[in-house]
Image (cartoon, rainbow, N blue to C red):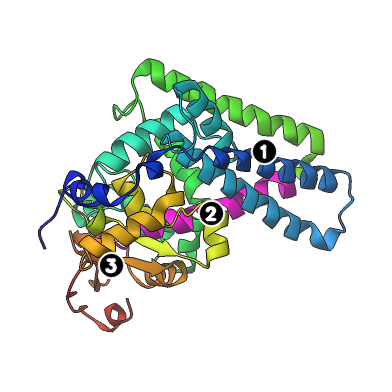
Amino acid sequence: MELLSVSAYVREVRPLLPDSAFAPARSRALWIPVHYAIIALLGWALATHRVPWPLWPVVSIVIGCCMAGVTFVGHEALHGGVVRGRMLIRVVGWFGFLPFAVSPQLWMAWHNRVHHNHCGQPGIDPDMYPTLAEYKTQRAARIMADHFGLGRKRLTGAASLLFGFTGQSLQMLFKAKQTGMLRSHLHHRAILETLMGLSVWTAVAFLVGPLAFAFVYLLPLVVANTIVMAFIMTNHNLSPLSPVNDPLVNSLSVTLPRTLEWLTLDFGFHVEHHLFPTMSTRHGRLVREALRARFPERYQALPLSTAIRRLHGTARVYRDDITLTDPNTGETWPTLTPGPRPAPSGAAGASA
């Protein structure tokens, strides 16, 4: 299948969308005080022992869901889809990514510039798993693919969900200057923004004490990681590598029940987001309808649960652009590609 550029799709789809879809969704900024009010209230209730012990993990899950919720706001805000004005965007983005202490400066370089402009391009896109050549020559790639990558029905792969976003964020911060992602003074700013976030959570730890902190922040952080990574991994890691940034080939949209889509700010409309990153995903359905009208044979979407099961059953190394492989067994699985798909090499592939 011929790969098309983002601009080729935009030329076809943009005339089908109303101008109002490109206005900032300012009301979404209100999610930030709502989520933090819930976090603060539940944190206070845990710290003052107003919650029965058996319910502490349940409260932690609710806090973690709120942490993921503000992260979705931060993502959209730093793309310019919530508010306008450079400073306001950065402020909303900082509060949005505060649960992970991710710097807005780092995120805009790593995600907005590198990932969005080079999505699916091996050796460039920081969100893609390694090629077979990288696996053979890079020890870090082998460790990730063999021990921590979600796939091959390995239970240890759950680490990518439980801790993946925190781990990748730290990795990006440490590598940003070395790889040229951030110039020296911007890297210093990213470190400062990160330290500001960490200082907030350090203060929380002193206020609530170590035991409560585990349930107010540490366990919720695992929950937030799991929610965020469930989207990040399904959005791209079943899809092909692509020398041309073709969002309908290298990205996947995932669906949930409508209430959950509302709570996650429609983050699953990811193909749509890669076409119009500055548009609020509130309008993802409009873009989906336009894509299905103009490119019905190319648009791909799966239920989130189905996509996670496919991740669990396949490998995370690319033998070539459209084939995933387990280097230890030689088994292969086809990536999700529009149109007819190649047959898998073995029984394990048949379940992919």
Start-end of magenta stretch: 214-239
Image: 109 above or below 227: above
Q: Position of residue 298 (x, y in %)?
A: 21, 64
* Residue depicted at x 40% and y 58%: 285
> Label 1 sits on what residue type?
Pro
Q: CA distance from mark 3 to mark 1?
A: 45 Å
Left or right: 322 with respect to 312?
left
Q: Nearer the viewer, residue 66 or 165?
A: 66
Q: Position of residue 339 (x, y in %)?
A: 18, 71
Q: CA distance from mark 2 to mark 3?
A: 33 Å
Q: Of callouts 2 and 1, which one flags the residue occurring earlier in the amino acid sequence?
A: 1
Q: Residue furthest top?
A: 185
* Residue depicted at x 17% and y 75%: 340
Main secondary structure along the magenta-highlighted residues: helix
* Residue under numbered circle 3: 326
Left or right: 240 with respect to 98?
left
Image: 263 above or below 195: below
Residue 341 image-quadrant placement = bottom left
Q: Of callouts 2 and 3, which one flags the residue occurring earlier in the amino acid sequence?
A: 2
**Does the magenta-highlighted stretch encompass residue 233?**
yes
Q: CA distance from mark 2 to mark 1?
A: 16 Å
Left or right: 210 with respect to 88?
right
Q: Secondary structure at mark 2?
A: loop
Quarter in which the N terminus is drawn: bottom left
Image: 270 above or below 312: above
* Residue under numbered circle 2: 264
